[in-house]
Image (cartoon, rainbow, N blue to C red):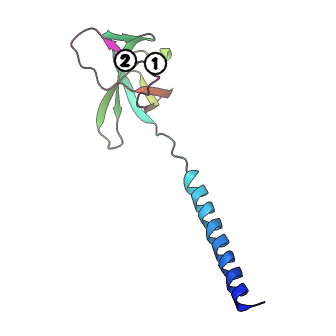
Amino acid sequence: MHIKDYFKTIKNLIMKFFFFISAVLLTFLSCRKNSPEFFKGSVDRNINSCSGSTGYVFIIKYITKNNTEDSLSTLTLPTQFKLSGTKINFQMRNLSNTDEVMFCNTMITPPKQKVIYNVKPQ
């Protein structure tokens, strides 16, 4: 084996090694699961002047990641939790293009509309 062939073989092995390490790192980074967190909150009230095809809009008060109180409006509160004062744990997300937007027929400004899901009693 000539010295030139030896260096070519070493170069190929090094390139394969770096490719393998890059592929492994990329796999680990892309498979990291960031599941949405659960929020603690309570059903404040429904707004009779705002609605959608699923019924009236409900206001939910909840504790944020920064441990402050905030509120949201939603059309996706399951029926068994539609009672003022009900304490719930839930996950939420912003509206997407396929989600229904609430309609209000008065001049009120409800809190930002969110989709809530995985709703459970506290």
Residue, far left: 107
Q: Residue 25, position in %: x, y?
A: 58, 62
Q: Amino acid at mark 2?
A: Phe
Q: Which mark is residue 44?
A: none
In the displayed structure image, the side of residue 69 where residue 6 appears, left or right: right
Q: Which mark is residue 58?
A: 2
Label 2 SS: strand
In the displayed structure image, the side of residue 64 where residue 92 appears, left or right: right
State the image quarter where residue 71 is shown: top left
Which residue is labeled 1 in the image?
81
Q: Residue 82, position in %: x, y?
A: 43, 15
Magenta segment includes 31: no
In the displayed structure image, the side of residue 79 where residue 113 appears, left or right: left
Label 1 SS: helix
State the image quarter where residue 23 is shown: bottom right
Does 25 appear above or below 61? Answer: below
Q: Amino acid at mark 1?
A: Phe
Does 22 appear above or below 41? Answer: below
Question: Which residue range is magenta in the image?
Answer: 93-112
Cα separation between marks 1 and 2: 10 Å
